[in-house]
Amino acid sequence: MASRLSNTWSLMGASWNVLKKDKELLVFPLLSGICCLLVLASFAMPVYNSGWSFFNKDGMTKLGTGQYVLLFLFYFVNYFIITFFNSAVVACAIKRMKGGDPTVSDGFQAAFQNIHLILGWAVVAAIVGAILRAIEERSGIVGRIVTAILGMAWSIVSFLVIPIMVAEGKGPLAALKDSTALLKKTWGEQLIGNFAFGLIIFFFMLPVIPLIFIGFFLTGGEGLVLILAIAALYVILLSLVQSVLQSIFQSAVYLYAREGEVAEGFDSSALQIAIRPR
């Protein structure tokens, strides 16, 4: 774990150096988050108002055909939004790593140019998500374990899909095949991720706990509202930074695997163990 955190810190630092040159990239995950919240509201409100339940009388999850169709549509729209804005970040990151000076406009242009590919990938990802959800819902604790394992495997084999679609214009299935082949060629069989961006960001979020404690017990009224607002903004900012850093790292891994090119600021040894055999 210590080695994994050390490697993650190195990769995050290199990604951060890229972000410092293009701080405007933060606009993409911000817009993505806003759009996803709007989508959630657009699905949740009609379901709530209709009284349509996803649970049985014992409070257990109960998904029928209609619920699975709705779940698939929800997944599809969310994956489309997330992939669209991630594609914009990846396009800008690759341009920067190749010596260019990307703009927000460049990111949007790349995403719109590949929108048909993004739609296709959203369908594939939504199908996989719905299947994993069905396994989890129908098989109890065993299903949850199997889903976790399959989910991790899926996240690895599909890791380079977005960079491949953006940089090479390949369709989602071809990109998935290439992603798997590139990872196996570079790192070998039975791959696992040796990076933990989320864990590092979690450590950065820990100061929020005493801040909220101070708000509840040592202040009141306007002071509490102000502290909660600061804590919320801090968490949102960290989430935006994490999203961009991961997309930049994804781009660096793609360049390393496809072209053998180590992006400026990245260490070849850190990239070599970023993904490793199990």
Image (cartoon, rainbow, N blue to C red):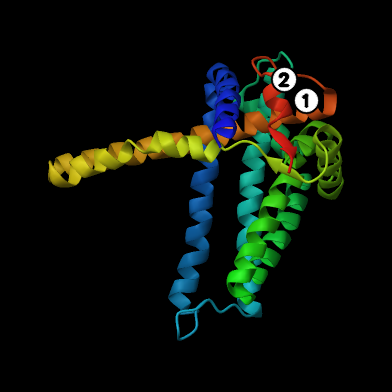
Q: Is residue 217 left or right of residue 84?
A: left
The answer to whether residue 70 shows anywhere in this view is no
Q: Is residue 107 left or right of residue 230?
A: right
In the rendering, at what x and y percent does residue 125 appear? Answer: 71, 55
Asked if 264 appears above or below 225 in the picture, the reply is above
Q: 94 and 58: which one is in front? A: 58
In the rendering, at what x and y percent does residue 249 appear? Answer: 65, 30
Q: Residues within 10 Å of mark 2 (few under 14, many from 20)?
A: some
The tag earlier along the polypeptide, 2 or 1, is 1
C-beta proximity under 8 Å, tags 2 and 1: yes
The residue that disc 1 covers is 256
The residue that disc 2 covers is 268
The answer to whether residue 141 shows anywhere in this view is yes
Asked if 141 appears above or below 185 in the picture, the reply is below
Badge 2 marks a residue whose secondary structure is: helix
Q: 273 and 94: which one is in front? A: 273
> Callout 1, which amino acid?
Tyr
Quadrant of the image occupied by residue 64:
bottom right
Q: Is residue 95 left or right of residue 103?
A: right
Query: Which image quadrant: the N terminus?
Result: top right
